[in-house]
Image: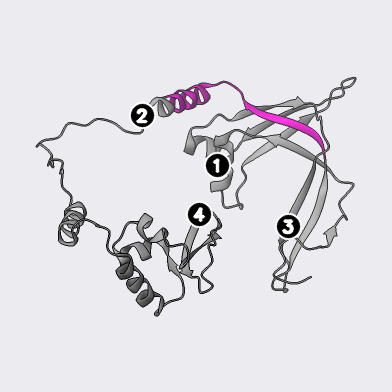
Amino acid sequence: MSKTSGHGERTLDVSNVGQEVWLVKVPKFIRESWSANSGDHEVGRLRVVKHPGQRAPTITFSMNEALVAANKLPREHKFISHDIKQCLGKLEGGPADGAAGQYNISFEGQVVRKYECQPVMDDNYLKLKLETKRAAATPARQAIAIERPANVYKPKSFHPHKVAQERQKESEGKKAREDKDKVLEVLFNAFEKHQYYNIKDLQKITRQPIVSWRCVPILTRLLNIRKKHSVVLLVHLNFNFKVSYWL
């Protein structure tokens, strides 16, 4: 397989296909505390108690006292079992050791149980929920009092670019229709330099309305070039002197 291929065939390690995996949904504060942990310290202990005559065991999780005291989090948690309505599995992947550009994928097992970790209500849990609600109710933008009035700029009716456009129109004057021979002479001089012109550029060169030189079909031809999201009209001379327009 080439290195540039993003969806090529790859080898899947299925040595742990018979391993059973639990899928556990944990609260956000537990995920954040685990992510902040370096991995060398204990984050908690899991207790599984099997009762005779019952299929599902009782599972509890006790968070480490150091994390509880540092972040003021609830310590005791219970696992609530949920039904698995679809076939789930666990896949892991990472770069291969000593091989640049290669990626290893392994199947770590099939999900056999699905649980939801819920904290037991205590003082820390109630305070955490209260702080979460307050943070959600706090608006992102707040009105504050200012000591001095802010600079207020009056709106402008004539912006610099509009003033420049008006001056250009005054200097050029109105686009009056010139004689047909003069328009053709300007067109011939323009097409001596380039074979194709955009319809807007040709209008600026001739300084004539589009209708005036489009009324000369024996000398011009319109081409329709479609791009991704627009249509560009190009004009070139028709040396066969035929009427040919198409879009």
Judge depth for marks 3 and 1 and give the one in front: 3
Left or right: 85 as drawn, with respect to 74: right
Disc 3 to disc 1, C-alpha distance: 24 Å
Q: Residue at x 41, y 61 (%)?
A: 199
Give the image quarter of residue 21: top right
The crowding category of the residue bearing disc 2, from other C-alpha atoms within 10 Å (few below 14, some 14 to 19, many at least 20), is few
Disc 2 to disc 4, C-alpha distance: 43 Å
Q: Residue at x 11, y 35 (%)?
A: 147
Which residue type does callout 4 highlight?
Ser
Residue to which mark 4 is pinned: 230
* Residue 2 picture location, percent across and down: 75, 72
Judge depth for marks 2 and 4 and give the one in front: 4
Seen in the picture, residue 107 relative to 178 is either above or below; the reply is above
Residue to which mark 1 is pinned: 33
Quick one: label 2 or label 4, which is nearer the N terminus? 2
Disc 4 to disc 3, C-alpha distance: 44 Å
Q: Secondary structure at mark 1?
A: helix
Q: Secondary structure at mark 3?
A: strand
- Image quadrant holding the C terminus, namely bottom right
Which residue type does callout 2 highlight?
Pro
Query: Magenta residues, as a range?
Result: 111-133
